[in-house]
Amino acid sequence: MATYKKRGYKPKTKEEKEEVLEQHSTTAEVFNTLDDKASKTEEWAVRNQNYIMIAVGAIAVVVLGYLGYNKFVAEPKASEAMNEMFQAQKYFDQAVNGTAKDSLYTLALNGGEGKFGFLDITNEYSGTPAANLANYYAGMAYLNLKDYKNAIKYLSEFSSDDVMLGPIAKGGIGDAFVQLNQPEDALGYYEEAANMNTNDYTTPMYLFKAANVAMKLGKTEKALENYKRIKDEFSTSSEASNIDVFIGRAEASL
């Protein structure tokens, strides 16, 4: 390193002086460039501060709006929907457990005593948990009323991870397709219901229904597989009580 670059050193020759001037010029140019960029950035911020404030404000409005909607609109609406569904639920339970089933299922669907039915709940409170549950009940009511197309429509709109309700909804669609003489569709929904949430009630029930439909379709190996699964995995279920008979029939058909 040259000695004239040391602190406190004063250039003596003409060449050293020119080099020092050149370095100062380069440094000044760098700082001028940085200052110029900073000034331009500052000028841009000043010119566009209204837009910046609007953008920040818009984001804040969206966030606060979402929180406010959940707190003051969505939650009260969901609670109101559940309260409105009470009478329809009562009609449905009476239909399941009593007589005059058709009229009670109809009341559950359309409402009575000035209260909403399940169909009203699905329309008026769309997007709420109550509306989702109303789709299930509407579908099952239509299934019991032998309106199989509407049963499929509403049960297809229902979504749940519940161990029982989820498989039963899928199985209900399978039942409707059986009644509509669409066994291929029924088989698919029975298998989906059987495998959706494994448990000792719905799984063997829909495995058995799937196996029976598979036998009618000539899919004997698939039927045998489902019968054997009932015997091996769900030996205490009601479907397993005579399962050896069905296994024997399937094996004889191979």
Image: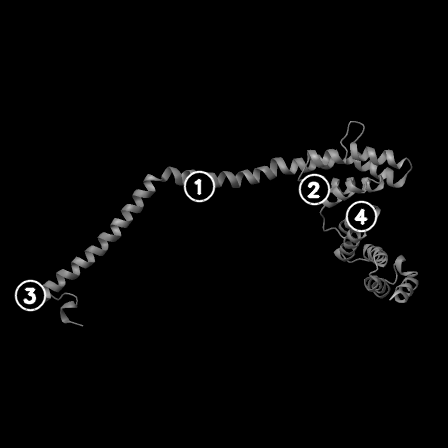
Quarter where residue 72 is shown? top right
The residue to which callout 4 is attached is 177
Residue at the disc numbered 1:
56
Q: Residue at x 30, y 44 (%)?
A: 42
Residue type (three-letter) at the residue carrying disc 3: Lys
Answer with mark 3 or mark 4, whichever residue precedes in sequence. Answer: 3
Residue labelled with disc 2: 129
**252 and 55: which one is in front?**
252
Residue on which disc 3 sits = 14
On screen, 248 above or below 181? below
> Counting residues from the N terminus, which is met first, the one under dot 1 or under dot 4?
1
Give the amino acid type for the residue marked by disc 2 in the picture. Answer: Pro
Q: Does the residue at mark 2 contact the one at mark 3 (Cβ under 8 Å)?
A: no
Residue drawn at (28%, 46%) of the image: 40
Question: For the residues marked 3 and 1, what is the alpha-carbon distance in whole angstroms?
Answer: 58 Å
Label 4, label 2: how many angstroms apart (C-alpha)? 27 Å
Q: CA distance from mark 2 to mark 3?
A: 88 Å
Residue extending farthest to the top is 114
Q: Quadrant of the N terminus?
A: bottom left
Question: Can you tell which of label 4 and label 2 is closer to the viewer?
Answer: 4
Q: Is the C-beta separation of discs 1 and 4 under 8 Å? A: no
Q: Nearer the viewer, mark 3 or mark 4?
A: 4
Give the structural element (helix, strand or loop) at label 2: helix
**Mark 3 in CB contact with mark 4 (< 8 angstroms):** no
Q: Earlier in the sequence, mark 4 or mark 2?
A: 2
Seen at 87% across and 38% down, the residue is: 95
* Horizontal side, residue 11 vs residue 248: left or right: left
